Image (cartoon, coloured by chain):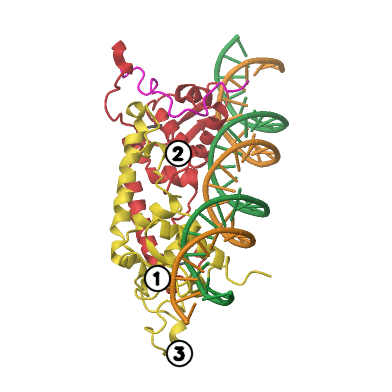
Chain colours: A red, B yellow, C orange, D green
Amino acid sequence: MLRISRLTDYGTMILVHLAARPDECCPASDVAAHTRLALPTVQKLLKLLARGDLVRSVRGAEGGYTLARPASGISAADILGVLEGPLGLTECSTESHQCELEAGCQVSSAWQKLDRAIRRALDDISLADLAEPPREFPVLNLSGRSLQARPATPAPPPRNRNRTGARP
Amino acid sequence: MLRISRLTDYGTMILVHLAARPDECCPASDVAAHTRLALPTVQKLLKLLARGDLVRSVRGAEGGYTLARPASGISAADILGVLEGPLGLTECSTESHQCELEAGCQVSSAWQKLDRAIRRALDDISLADLAEPPREFPVLNLSGRSLQARPATPAPPPRNRNRTGARP
DNA sequence: GTCATACTGGACTAAGATAGTCCCATATGC
DNA sequence: GCATATGGGACTATCTTAGTCCAGTATGAC
Ligand code: FES
Ligand code: FES
């Protein structure tokens, strides 16, 4: 119920990746390699994120993407707003009150109450929250290498589709 | 963002209708007529709701549907659970932890935090809340007729599709 | 100046979810 | 027996999503 789209999930992973490298300018190919997502998908998402002013882009050689603001200034609501559009919980709770009969409908007011509750929760979570490692890596950190050097890179692939290099 | 499906919205309207008539056994045709939804759609939804134990059905002549429990005992989470399935916010937050790498993924824990927040909000809203009229009908009540006699009937059509009688 | 690198914009297809309809079987009261 | 209902499921049209690809443009390195 109430699922967010897979692209949004991917987009969040990308943002997390960028958040871990505040001073680097990462090209899409880099991001794809590190997140293990397919390159075209990453490109598409980065374009969307740039258009939504969540990341800043630099064109040309040595170009790439950076977060537009510090991670703490980007909320989950921002991310969903950019990647899923400004749709409300129901079609009636959209801004463009297309349902002109709202006052007569018993359902709308309570749905909107719920809608506000969700928005509040979304506002409370920042990208920084999303990015912080929940706990230590359980298995993969045997090498004793500095976590600082490769903050998010060794994270295992998220799910078993849309990997890179799937082109035959 | 985070939209619930239109059928779920319809289903809620149907439940609200039944909630207003706790002691009647309403056939689907009745519900369709009063909610102004198309009959086949109403039938389908009532079947789903019956299977999800939110409404009780009586077969045969004089049969129909009633709420399985008082409206205050049916939460929004129940409704969404029955009509949209038990899907989590992301595919990773489903019960069947298909993403075996959860511990390594930075994103999951915060998404699940959000998921819990939403569930809590859903649990807090009951069908009784959804059913209570938000305020008086603004225009339609000029006739001075008793509201009690037709509690939810004069509510205007919810949106401009899927009306009854669309069959040529 | 030329070239390789990278973003920009949009078109396009395949797959999947959603909405809506219809049919046949079964139960029940009159 | 028959009209009235629900139960179960199949089916199609349509919209959305996911994923890919290409032609264009900007920019730094050589
Ligand atoms: S991608 Fe599955 S837990 Fe993060
Ligand atoms: S159906 Fe639109 S406000 Fe209720």
**Residue position for label 1:** B18
Q: Position of residue B55 (x, y in %)?
A: 38, 63
Please tell me whether mark 2 or mark 3 is closer to you in this view: 3
Span highlighted in magenta in the image: A145-168
**Tag 1: Cα neighbours inside 10 Å, few (<14), some, or many (≥20)?**
many
Q: Is residue A16 above or below residue B41?
A: above
Q: Main secondary structure of the magenta part?
A: loop
- Amino acid at dot 1: Leu
- Amino acid at dot 3: Ser
Cβ atoms at labels 2 and 3 below 8 Å apart: no
Is A109 left, or right, of A61 in this rendering? Answer: left
Query: Callout 1: helix, strand or loop?
Result: helix
**Residue position for label 2:** A54
Q: Judge whether residue A149 is colored magenta.
A: yes
Q: Which image quadrant shows ligand 1?
A: top left
- Find the distance from the CA under tag 1 to the CA under tag 2: 46 Å
Q: For this rendering, which residue is in front, B93 or B51?
A: B51
- Find the distance from the CA under tag 3 to the CA under tag 1: 25 Å
Please tell me whether mark 3 or mark 1 is closer to you in this view: 1
Which residue lies at the image location 33% right of the left edge and 50% below the top edge? B118
**Residue position for label 3:** B143
Which residue lies at the image location 28% right of the left edge and 58% below the top edge? B124
Please tell me whether mark 1 or mark 2 is closer to you in this view: 1
Query: Callout 3: helix, strand or loop?
Result: helix
- Find the distance from the CA under tag 2 to the CA under tag 3: 54 Å
Is A100 left, or right, of D13 in this rendering? Answer: left
Query: Callout 2: helix, strand or loop?
Result: loop
Residue A4 shows up from this direction = yes
Residue A94 shows up from this direction = no
Q: Position of residue B9 (x, y in %)?
A: 46, 61
Is B1 left, or right, of B124 in this rendering? Answer: right
Is A119 left, or right, of D4 in this rendering? Answer: left
